Image (cartoon, grey):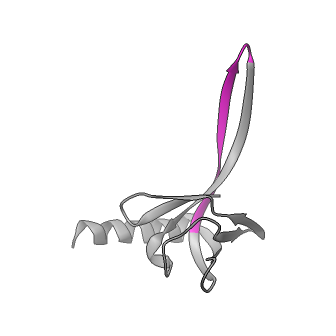
Amino acid sequence: MSWSTLSDNLLTHSLSVLGEDVLYTPTLGTPVTIRGVFEKVHTELDLGRGSSVSSSRPQVGIRLADLAALPVKDDTVTINSVVYKVVDSEEDGEGGTTLRL
């Protein structure tokens, strides 16, 4: 069994256990329900002098093979009835990607 097959099997299993249903809607094409791991990543920026700004940015990890085409900016994902717009996609080189929302 090849490394890419093992990696894809692991990603598929991980998403089935840890993921949740995500409605992926490409700007061109048909919506599809896939599995994804959703999280809100916390970021804090120190402005100096005891001041800081904090924020959270939503993202979802998905399997690229579950989509008919590569994700692009302005595609949307619906998670728990909330619609998010795709801002960026960061492929991991192993068949998955993190969609920045």
To which quarter of the image does residue 36 belong? bottom right
> In the rendered image of this protein, does residue 46 appear above or below residue 58?
above
Residue farthest to the bottom, as pictured: 30
Expressed as whole percent of the image width and height from the top left, the position of residue 98 reads 52, 58
* Residue at left offset 29%, top offset 68%: 4
Residue interval drawn in magenta: 36-50
Residue farthest to the right, as pictured: 81
* Residue at left offset 63%, top offset 63%: 86
Left or right of 76, for residue 12? left
> In the rendered image of this protein, does residue 11 appear above or below residue 54?
below
Quadrant where the C terminus sits is: bottom right
Quadrant where the N terminus sits is: bottom left
> In the rendered image of this protein, does residue 43 appear above or below residue 52?
below
Residue farthest to the top, as pictured: 49
* Magenta region, main secondary structure: strand
Magenta-drawn stretch contains 38: yes
Residue farthest to the left, as pictured: 1
Magenta-drawn stretch contains 79: no
Expressed as whole percent of the image width and height from the top left, the position of residue 11 reads 43, 66
The foreground one among 67 and 81 is 67
* Residue at left offset 53%, top offset 70%: 71
Expressed as whole percent of the image width and height from the top left, the position of residue 20 reads 62, 69
